[in-house]
Amino acid sequence: MPFARMPLTILKSPWMLAPVVVGLMFVGQAQHKTLPVKVPVPIKTLHFSSQFRPSQDNRATYHVDISADGGTMAVGFGNQFLSVDLDAGKPLFRQELPTLKGSDLEFYWFAFSPDSRRLALAAKGGKVLFLAPRTGKTLQSLQTSGELVHFWFSPDSRFLCTMGALGEAEIWDLHTFKKLRTLQEDQVPWTLTANSQQVLTADLKGHLRLVSVTTGKSSPFLNLTDPAILYQVSPDGKKLATADVKMPQGTLMKVAPMSFVSVWDTRTQKRLAQFALTGEGRISRLMFADGGKTLVAGTQRGSIVVWNVLKKKTLQHFQAHQGEIIDLELHQDRLYSAAGLGEVKIWDFSQIRSP
């Protein structure tokens, strides 16, 4: 099952493609689920599951990505691929991709560039195809070292970071379509800083480092007590949000795990806030809004949670979908949430953050 994405991020959780369980808590005191007086109602709801044939492969899963401008959505199910016009609510083009025979990959990864001009698609043999989002025409391509499980754009759409099936990570210049460098095995890429010149990487012990895109030089950034499953940088680069899941200490396994979200000051490396959720499974998507003042999360169980980071306050917590939220995008005060096989809802974000 796929896991998250980010506007400011070169990566959308590489560990989302592995069976990892994750979550969050409030500093100093438990933060209880706060239900708003008025539950938000979506402006529009679209369904596209009928566009896909049942898969003969029981492992077949799905993936959804929405362009940053809110105009286009891509949906993949097994080897079936569909591009959708969200304004008109109609399919634009569809493709059936060659089966990855002999591979453990369950689906093809794809993502829109942050400028919404290209749709990148992982093809058989480690090739990345760059398509026109509304026509499916191949614009460019590049060849990586092996079969791909994930890739991420830099915030300025200039660089691409690819993750291979064996864990190899490579950085590509999308002006020249040449490989700049290969990251070390313990440097799992997660996101780029605001200027897109450094990749935030993390190892399995929770040690975060910054790697220069151009020189490859690595420098320490932040050491966490435990590794997180999601890392999201604010648009101004001043805040970092992390998410992970833990079992409360001294409890039996039947007790629901708690999901924790922490917000860090990237300059002082101090934690600014911490929030906790119970009964929601892991956090599947994190997104900053309002210049980093607001943090939005999508959960495994279909809830959307909105926090005011400065006031350490829950603004909204409501059930948006019945299944895991796979993508969140914010464009011109419209919040787009995607879950399930091609279900997307469009919300008035001004009402959500001011219940």
Image (spheres, rainbow, N blue to C red):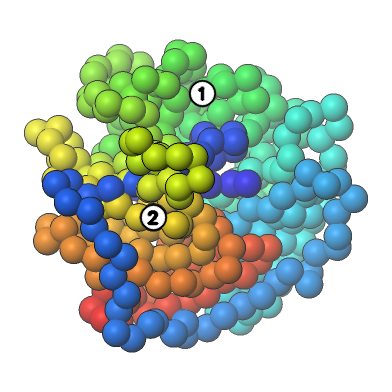
Q: Nearer the viewer, residue 278 or 255?
A: 255
For the question of whether residue 134 can be seen, the reply is no
Looking at the image, which residue sits at the far right?
56
Q: Is residue 47 above or below residue 27?
A: below
Give the label on residue 208, or none.
none
Residue 24, image x and y in percent? 34, 46
Q: Earlier in the sequence, mark 1 or mark 2?
A: 1
Pick the front one: 16 or 332: 16
For mark 2, what is the residue?
278
Mark 1, secondary structure of its residue: strand
Where 14 sits versus 91, above or below? Answer: above
Element type at mark 2: strand
Q: Amino acid at mark 1?
A: Glu
Q: Dividing the image into 4 quarters, which one contains the C terminus?
A: bottom left
Q: Considering depth in this image, is 33 or 116 the residue closer to the camera?
A: 33
Q: Are marks 1 and 2 in contact (CB under 8 Å)?
A: no
- Which residue is denoted by mark 1 in the rendering? 170
Q: Is residue 326 left or right of residue 310?
A: right
Circle 1 Cα neighbour tier, 10 Å, few/some/many (<14 / 14–19 / ≥20) = many
Q: Position of residue 178 (x, y in %)?
A: 53, 25
- Does residue 105 appear left or right of residue 155 in this picture? right
Q: Amino acid at mark 2?
A: Thr
Judged left or right of residue 329, residue 131 is right
Real-space Cα separation, disc 1 to disc 2, in angstroms? 37 Å
